[in-house]
Image (cartoon, rainbow, N blue to C red):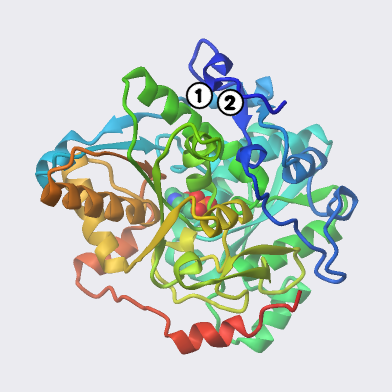
Amino acid sequence: MKEKIPYKIYLDETEIPKYWYNVRADMKTKPAPLLNPGTHQPLTAEDLAPIFCEELIKQELDNDTAYVEIPQEIRDFYKMYRPSPLVRAYCLEEKLGTPAKIYYKFEGNNTSGSHKLNSAIAQAYYAKNQGLKGVTTETGAGQWGTALSMACAYLGLDLKVFMVKVSYEQKPFRREVMRTYGASVTPSPSETTEIGRAILKEHPGTTGSLGCAISEAVEVATKNEGYRYVLGSVLNQVLLHQSIIGLETKTALDKYGVKPDIIIGCAGGGSNLGGLIAPFMGEKLRGENDYRIIAVEPASCPSFTRGTFAYDFCDTGRICPLAKMYTIGSNYIPAPNHAGGLRFHGMSTVLSQLYHDGYMEAVAVPQTKVFEAAEMFARVEGILPAPESSHAIRVAIDEALKCKETGEEKNIVFGLTGTGYFDMVAYEKFNDGVMDDYIPTDEELAESIKTLPQV
Ligand SMILES: *Cc1c(COP(=O)(O)O)cnc(C)c1O
């Protein structure tokens, strides 16, 4: 199904898309395949079967099907909180005195507080359908774990979460939300897995990273009968599920005859950005329309802007597949900045390829500048944004201020991925003026890049 059917016909009476859109179908250069970490051969569905759910493997490997039907049960779940609001930021525009029109797609209006729920429910659904007992996962800031624990509770699946230690300690409430929904939560690195023990031996006192937690969760999934591992970002399947963000955004903008000039999203593993831009990127790839697309990442973990485009491990323990992506090295443990969801060393292979081919731009921003933007946004728009989302706010504001200088009335759309109510320790640091801007040196990054596998 590669034909260019306008996505609109896929909407049902609630304006929720009936199909996800797979941008890979329209990419001339497809993202490079995942490789077996031992043999360096492309991974097959069989190789992946001990780790991932069957249907999700199909979605992961499918570079050709443009539209994938959303199962009715998932659409019924989506109906509880979708379509999510697309809001015109009138008060922010006025505060900035900009002629630009700013819109944001708000994904924080569900109980889990972020866009992660869009993929959590899909992944939990396919695990349940396969007859599994449960799933394992990692969580950084806790949004993914929270979303997945909600989805697993809804479907009656067991869930074991490995939570990056710094977040486990900084965000005890996040942890309790997950436990309330029935998940077990272990701080990572932990003594409960082989890989955790090895990492602790090598880096005693480490505050952990997503890469460490992934290694532990995969180990537990492969060693327990009836369990598989699920991941909240980076993977092709996650970008596919998140395309619902972009499809709804496009529908709403089309309804009001608004064509975005600039589309902005924060990028951790790339799922919200990949989802938000999907239908717009599709048009760009097919030569039907042009948009400026900007990925925003933290200056403390600059995969796109200072990384290398190469095969690398997705995890610190080096047991996961190799992915060709922009990476600062799987050994790199980023400084504990406050946007936990953006502390991943790599990036989605889809976005990496698109960035490499010049279809999008990237900017890195320091965290105090991000919190300045977050606070301004909260005061004028009322929503208290997640630190991750605030990266996109920062650049949306910067672009709107450029319009103020030039007098251009650009349409700026950004993804507001979630709320920041569990991030008050970070806001406290900012309010007290004790937040710092850690930026890695070239030497540190060069040291980490040396550890890339030779492929
Ligand atoms: C996880 C998360 C992100 C970053 O993840 P992506 O996969 O890059 O989207 C951004 N914002 C929020 C609120 C998150 O929870």
Q: Amino acid at mark 2?
A: Phe
The residue sitting at 50% across, 24% down in the picture is: 80
Furthest-front residue in view?
287
Residue 370 percent coordinates (x, y): 29, 61
| Contact? badges 1 and 2 (CB < 8 Å) | yes
Element class at badge 2? helix
The residue carrying pointer 2 sits among few (fewer than 14), some (14 to 19) or many (20 or more) residues within 10 Å by Cα, namely: some
The answer to whether residue 381 is left or right of residue 123 is left
Residue 56 appearing in the image: yes
Q: Is residue 208 above or below residue 95?
A: below
Q: Which residue is mark 1?
A: 80
Say which mark, if any, is on residue 125.
none
- Please state which of residues 243 and 50 is positioned toward the viewer in this rendering: 243
Q: Residue at x 44, y 34 (%)?
A: 289
Is the CB of the residue bearing disc 2 within 8 angstroms of ligand 1? no
Q: Is 389 positioned to the left or the right of 75 in the image? A: left
x 42%, y 85%: residue: 441
**Residue 129 vs residue 102, the one in the foreground:** 102
Q: Amino acid at mark 1?
A: Met
Residue situated in front as seen by the camera: 432 or 25: 25
Q: Is residue 217 above or below residue 393?
A: below
**Which quadrant holds the N terminus?**
top right
The location of residue 57, given as percent across then percent down, is 78, 44
> Which quadrant of the view contains residue 156?
top right
Which quadrant holds the C terminus? bottom right
Q: Secondary structure at mark 1?
A: loop
**Quarter location, residue 5:** top right
Q: Residue at x 67, y 78 (%)?
A: 452
Bin the neighbour count of mark 1 within 10 Å (Cα to Cα): few under 14, some 14-19, many 20 and up: few
**How far across and down, in percent of the image, does residue 208 sit?**
56, 74
For marks 1 and 2, give the CA distance: 6 Å
Q: Which mark is residue 77?
A: 2
